[in-house]
Amino acid sequence: MIVELGHFALILALVVALVQSTIPLVGAHRRWSSWMAVAEPAALIQLLLVGFAFAALTWAFVTSDFSLKLVVENSHTLKPMIYKISGVWGNHEGSLLLWVLILALFGAAVTLFGGNLPTTLKARVLSVQAMIGVAFLAFMILTSNPFLRLAMPPMNGQDMNPLLQDPGLAFHPPFLYLGYVGLSMSFSFAVAALLEGRVDAAWGRWVRPWTLAAWIFLTIGIALGSWWAYYELGWGGFWFWDPVENASFMPWLFAAALLHSAIVVEKRESLKSWTILLAILAFGFSLIGTFLVRSGVITSVHAFANDPQRGVFVLLILAVFMGGALTLFAARAGAMEAKGIFSLVSRESALVANNILLSVSAFVVFVGTIWPLVAEMGFGRKLSVGAPFFNAAFTPFMIALALILPIGAILPWKRGNLRRAILPLRGALVLSLALAVLIWSVQTGRSALGPIGALLAAWVILGALTDLWLRAGRGTISDRLSRLTRLPRADWGKALSHAGFGTTIFAVAAINAWAVEDIRVVKPGEPFALGPYQVTLTGVDEIQGPNYTSHMATMTITKDGREIATLHPEKRSYTFARMPTTEAAIDYGVTRDVYLVIGDQQEDGGWAVRSYIKPFANWIWLGSLMMAGGGVLSLTDRRYRIAAGARRPANAVPAE
Amino acid sequence: MKRLLAATALALSLLAPAAHAVQPDEILPDPTLEARARALSQNLRCLVCRNENIDDSNAPLARDLRILLRERLTAGDTDDQAVAYLVDRYGEYVLLKPTTHGANLILWIAGPAMLIAGIGIAVYANSRRYRRVALPPSPEVLSEQEKKRLDELMQQ
């Protein structure tokens, strides 16, 4: 019964979304306030309806209602409760429902927190938002209904893919969706602004927090996914340039670009049309990512041809929204008069360079991701584009970005002097060069990757510190320190995020340059050396888990005769999903992780063991966390909390 | 038929007990040769896997390819010869880093071309912005033309 009510609520939500996507839009055009007023209650009702549908599906998973097809395919009575709940979105249909729920949540947030938005803009934003809702609700109800019943319910379910039964991955999708859908807010604001025909500083100030929030969620989501890959997949890789990863990385890059160009709109009223275009593209690439992942087109063109229904529907959504928005952009963008002009050497120009590098790098990821498809359909060549291509084609953009970042961050607005900007950075430059040389001489004979990574990282991090120090103004050190504590949170956020970027660069370079690997057959009780450590396999036990059986090894790590850790790497076999997984055991450390994996038993009674030292592994995610944390600091800046976006009519320039 | 084989191999690789990436018994006694094999393996695709190189893959086919590659290297092949041997048998699909032949040139040039285009558009847009909104004369800095004109005037 609850399931039917959920199903009904979902259909009702589609009807409400249809109303919300049309009536307020007409109202805003005709200036009929009663029609515009429809938007707000409609957005709230939508949240209630979709929320109820989601709760109904969750209920079905929690109670293991095996009359529901989706529950049968993705759950099992013996599965731990947390994974019964995460099973709701651990599949195509359920994850779409989560997507729509978050969309409704953001719509309601505009209603509740957008008090000071102009009435017409608010009505238009909510209308565009509802159009996206209509598209995805229809997609779900027509092609991917989560509420389908089975005539003959089986006794038990088929369990979820065991790789997904993991705390890191349970919360990875919700964060990603918060990010994707958050970008739909920037999109709605961009389209609404095009309809309004005006973009001003106030618009920049409204859009930036939404973009920032979306970017923070994407950062956390991507970091969670990569952390999961690191400890779960069994060889300590953290990024594979898989199409599914790229699908989330492209919107992240565009969101990062948008974040920076919105600053120029907010502070200098320049780059308006470019910012609008970026907002459209950022969401567009979220949709492209959705298409790549959901249609199966990337795994195999044939999989797509066999079941094109879903893929074609997403492609249609993509075509309508991108086509519509870009046409509107082409018609209206010319009218977005820039107010602020700037010289070639200025903060604005530096941010333009940032935007070019970020968008072109996203474009490279995009071309690499779809190239196998293009080559097969257009040129009849079946080929692969993998990590080696992306490493070669993408990395130069990040290096360039890291090089210009500290200089751009301290250049003055409008017109600057390159020499005067570099002068305060000479300390940072000398220190980072010295660090690189030091590392180069210590590591003797290894790849240049380590020193170069350290150089870039130190340059970016010290640059961020220099930036803060300069913001503290002139005067005695104590004066400056006290002023430092009173800097706006946005300044701290900027420094923290940039330092996080540097940290991640360093960690990625370090783990690639200095990882130690050892593969061998180990007999219980015979120690072997791994870098400075001694590793001993003491034994392997068979363990029975809730829905799996496991070979659990006990391994001790000692250094200079002192025990450091006892680890239990496992090899699991999931009973119902019939899939083996490896559970690596990791001794986490500040400067290195020791990473142990147990393999098969050999004929002579020994076990295949793979062991690694992964230097500075945690710093990858520490850096990501710093980037996200900087975003949060910036989001709580005073100017967003107080009189956010108070419109200054005197300065606003109508575009018509 | 080929596709059926691939599908079967994929199904087998999923059901087979987790045979790990590089196995201890595959490792060559000669460390330099082994290092070359490892480096090459990272650029070769496990044909039945999803975006995995043969060095990391657990699939039995990846193991066969690893062993085949090591046999070629032991037989005295250069890196290029060993890779060419695999490409002959499995097609360019096996390469994770696509060649620059023919249409693939588009793939490799796309990034740099876009970068140049981006810079071009940015510079053009900036100069247009300047023309639209006349730049107020800067109090401190003179342009080259202004300097030249000033020199001329001073000399007169």
Image: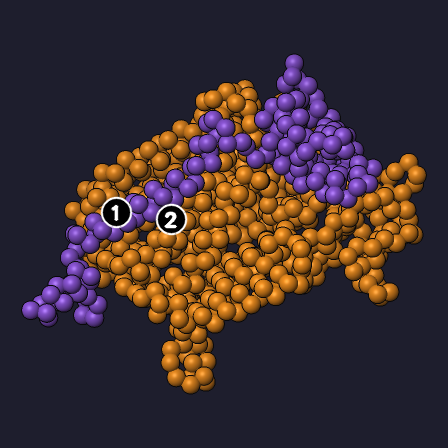
Chain colours: A orange, B purple
* Along the line of sight, the residue nearer the viewer: B74 or A161: B74
Name the residue located 60 percent from the left edge and 39 percent from the top edge.
Answer: A90
Name the residue located 47 percent from the left edge and 22 percent from the top edge.
Answer: A379
Residue A608: x %, y % from top left: 83, 42
Residue A371: x %, y % from top left: 49, 31
Alpha carbons under labels 2 and 1: distance apart = 14 Å
* Along the line of sight, the residue nearer the viewer: A449 or A326: A449
Q: Where on the picture, by quarter, is residue A620?
A: bottom right
Q: Residues within 10 Å of mark 2 (few under 14, many from 20)?
A: many
Does residue A421 appear anywhere in the picture? yes
Name the residue located 55 percent from the left edge and 44 percent from the top edge.
Answer: A391
Q: In this view, does B1 lie above or below A374?
A: above
Q: Both on one chain, marks 2 and 1?
A: no
Q: In this view, does A562 lie above or below A128?
A: below
Q: Element under label 2? A: helix
- Marks 2/1 in contact by CB < 8 Å: the verdict is no
Q: Which amino acid does label 1 sit on?
A: Tyr
> Label 1 lies in what chain?
B
Q: Mark 2 or mark 1: which is in front?
A: 1
Which part of the image, by quadrant, shows the N terminus of chain A? top right
Q: Name the residue under label 1.
A: B124
Q: Mark 2 points at which residue?
A: A356
